[in-house]
Amino acid sequence: MTIALGISDLGKRFGGLVAIDGLSLAIDDGESVGLIGPNGAGKTTIIGLIMGELRPDSGRIDLFGKDISPLGVAERIRCGISRTWQIPRPFANLSVIENIRIGSMPDSLRGMIFDRSDPIRERELAMSVGLAKNDLERKASDLAMGDLRKLEMARTLAAGARILLLDEVFAGLTVGEIDHIAAVIQNLRSRGITFLIVSHDLPALAPLIDRAVAIDRGRVIAEGPLDDILDHPDVRDSYLGR
Amino acid sequence: MDIGRHHLALWAIAAAGLFVLPSLVGSGILRTLILANYLAIFAISWDVLSGRTGYISFGQPFLIGIGAYTTAILTKRFDVPMEISIPAAVLVTMVGGLIVLLPALRLRGSYFALVTLALMELCYQLVQVIRPDITGGTRGMSGLPTLTRGASNGYYLSTGLMLTIALTAWMLMRTRLGLALSAIGMDEGAVQGAGLSPTRLKSFAFLASAFIAGLGGAFYTHYLGSIAPRALFDITFLFTILAAALIGGSGTVIGPILGAFFLTFLLEWLRPLLPGAERYFVYGLVALLLYMYQPAGILAIIERVRVRLFGDSRSG
Amino acid sequence: MLLQILIQGFLLSGLYALIAVGFTLIFGIGRILNLAHGSYLMAGGYAFFWIGQIIGLPKIIGVALAVFLGAGMGIAIYRLIVRPLKGDRIAVEIATLILAVILQAAIVLIFGSSSKIPHPLVPGVVRIADTPIAWSILVATCASWIILLSLYAFIRLSHTGRAMQAVSMDPKGAAICGIDSNRIDIIVWSISGGLGALAGVFFAGYTQLSPSMWVTPLIISVAVVIVGGIGSIMGTLAVAHIIGFMEVIVTTLIAPELRGVFTMGLIIVALLFRPRGLFGREEI
């Protein structure tokens, strides 16, 4: 098995606060990993660091064996890794299909001007995350939360993501929408996409992941099947507080 | 397609109309049209940057002024022919565009607008202080070479220039590049998150805007044959450009053109009623009310009327 | 020379602080930049001129009218522009800039485009350390200091002032505590306008009245907010002195024409290298 995403000895402080403290993590190609931990444990910070939105103080990040530490955000995305946000960030005044088009553009001015867009592929991407056909021309600002999350996933897939980092992917969803999103994730897993999923909704998370990693105060405190690590004393302590 | 032939005929009629116009109307109206053309160019240049990317520039006169001053100084003080001085002016204006880009890499929103405002005022002060023997100081310069003689030639030149710029901008903005630039205005972080480099897109928008501003500024100077710092680096001038783009409908190409013609002719019609600078009072009120209550501009009003009259049947 | 710079610097800076304080108050309470702030000064200056030299009433009535006019303008701008735009800062900036141009045109409409020289608030000249200083300028600076210090006391000590602080720190939190933020906003906007117009009466003594006189005080106010990065009164005073002294030093030692260049340059440099300002973000 090749390692899709390798994080070694990652460190990040904000002023005096140590957010990430020598964290290491490896995710195999095609694996789905859940990242859990109490509020403020550093989950969102890790995603920011992997994507290059934040600069780490120490450590390195490898993507399919290649050190991506020196790369900027857009370049990392071109390497096949992408994220979604806790609060979805669609381009509100653009239609669903245009949102996907932004993701599928080449990152060069010449390509944007002269190459044609591929409406069939855009359509397929929208379908693959379960967006309805008659939603494609609707403005993104008119969509419900569940559809926004789908749209965001479609946009990241359009950019060629093979590894998806989902931040609080179930936040703000109704029960029905959670089922939909879960089905989309299962579908993408079966197509070989690698996942790192952050969620507080453990029952929803459980069927979507191969194993879980629990962190607290920027450190890994337990790793393994979700049921096992929920019984882990450190994990219990971190959730209940000491 | 049927629609295509229909459109082609409309375009041909419009072009013919524009061509024979000088023999139908007096030179007074032609001069107004010329002013409207240049204002349209400036408004498009503002819109390419601010209407799309959401970086509101209060410094468009700064860019236009750089273009105007460069060609004025080259032709007047160094006897450079206009064929060289105008391209040179455009290049220098693009360097000016990079100067405006610099703060945009660090600042967003209201602060960015303020820096560009400060840049414009700074230029006004500098022009008067630094080498007045070259810049003409407070009084500016006059007796510059002109490109055309007579109102009708000036009209053909300015119309051709405006239409070329508008058409190029329109075609460019219809591509995926235009889509990406609008996306910057909505959520720059998400553009980056979609794997596109916002810096590259912004650089393009700023340079394109500066290119248009420089071209317009240089031609305008050689139409007027004179240059005055207070007429260029001026909040009233800035206001006129902003108002044209916003009133017409920003984020489009046709909107700023509509706005420019609307405002220029409004200004002309008010001339007999309110001589002098007081016209700006009415002018400003119209701009403010439209901006407050119809932010999408005249274009949206026209669209609404069209839908009401003919139903919502867009042909594309 | 040094003494002269010191005296001139303190006189000018005191006035600058009064010019900018309304602008920083508004910035402090809603992070809103009111580009029509210079228009308060213009309105105040012309109102003073109108009462004193056209109607011929006592000057003190002119001062009072200026303050009321400014306060009314502040409330009007808040009610008619800021509130309908729902705090969209960029839209407010554009709309207030357009408003400033309208008001400039209105002044031309009423008073004509030529400059006017208002009578000094207090006639006569006093010599301090061999420097002749107009009484009106001395009075303006002292009045500025008194007003700024009382405003500071008002904000620190009074109930309303503390509510203003609360709104500036966290509007939602303040609303939960039962503060009517709408009322607070109206109070702050009227204070801002009134003080701006009063500063206009003083400012007219320095320069002259002209329809474009609003630009310079606006640039000064912008510079104070940008360089200070704050909405606090003490910060305003501090930065006003930086700018005031810089202008006096440039005027006396280098060239009078360059004073504006340095202020503008300061704005640009501050924004590029310290976007959050010298003092960072602070509450009122």
Image (cartoon, rainbow, N blue to C red):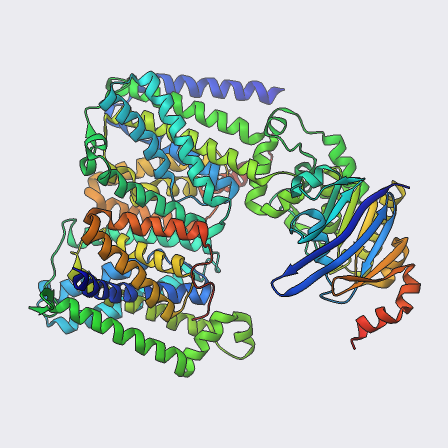
In the rendered image, which quarter is residue B17 located in? top left
Coordinates of residue C177 in the picture (x, y in percent)? 54, 79
Above or below C220: residue A107? above
Q: Residue at x 29, y 37 (%)?
A: B232
Q: How many marks?
A: 0
In the rendered image, which quarter is residue B182 located in? top right
Coordinates of residue C260 in the picture (x, y in percent)? 26, 50
Coordinates of residue B183 in the picture (x, y in percent)? 59, 42
Above or below C269: residue C57? below
- Residue in front for this viewpoint, C18 or A60: A60
- Residue in front for this viewpoint, C255 or B252: C255
Above or below B18: residue C78? below
Using the rendered image of the protein, determine whether residue A31 is visible from the camera's viewpoint: yes
Above or below B32: residue C167? below
- In this image, A145 relative to C117: left or right? right
Using the rendered image of the protein, determine whether residue C39 is visible from the camera's viewpoint: no
Quadrant placement of the N terminus of chain A: top right
Which residue lies most toward the front here? C2
Quadrant placement of the C terminus of chain A: bottom right
- In this image, C213 relative to C157: left or right? left
Coordinates of residue B112 in the picture (x, y in percent)? 44, 48
Which residue lies most toward the left here? C124
